[in-house]
Image: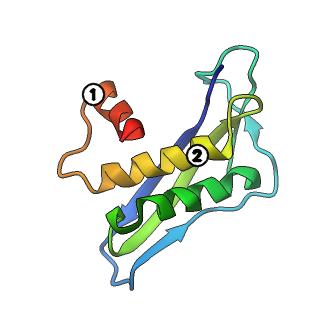
Amino acid sequence: MTLYGLLSASLDQSTDTQGLRVDVPIEPSSGESWPLSLARSYDKVLTGFAAEYLPGLFRGVEDVGKGVPGYGILSFDRMAHSEIGSSMEVFRELTRAILRAFTMAQAPETPEEAFALLMA
């Protein structure tokens, strides 16, 4: 079984916001084919924010709860998903890992440290 998801975000804490604001772009298309896929050759990868996976982002924020940054603007800026290996749950877990990384004193330096954020 192959699970696939790519997600990136930034956190801007330079503005005076009340609580954490989450910005997610909504794109009307299902995405464009992405040739740099890490997924197996039989799984087509598309870029863009597919509506079917967006609830996973918000659930991931809710899961972390009090562990999320207390204020700022969390902006999701890139997403890639595959036709076979992606699910709302994959993006929920990726969101949780991103939020854990934002609250760390030092960013993960190795792939193993980054992968451990998914397992926490």
Q: Residue at x 50, y 44 (%)?
A: 94
Task: Write down the quadrant of residue 14 in the picture.
Answer: bottom left
Q: In this rendering, is residue 73 above or below 48?
A: below
Report the side of 109 relative to 59 (left or right). Answer: left
* Separation of residues labelled 2 and 1 (CA atoms): 21 Å
Residue that badge 2 annotates: 91
Q: Secondary structure at mark 1?
A: loop
The x and y percentages for residue 74 are 45, 65
Q: Which mark is residue 11?
A: none
Task: Write down the quadrant of residue 108 in the picture.
Answer: top left
> Which label lies toward us, 2 or 1?
2
The x and y percentages for residue 55 are 66, 59
Observer-nearest residue: 56 or 37?
A: 56
Residue closest to the far top? 41
Q: Quadrant of the N terminus?
A: top right
Q: Which mark is residue 110?
A: 1
Q: In this rendering, is residue 54 above or below 83?
A: below
The x and y percentages for residue 112 are 31, 26
The x and y percentages for residue 87 are 68, 40
- Under mark 1, the amino acid is Thr
Q: Quadrant of the C terminus?
A: top left
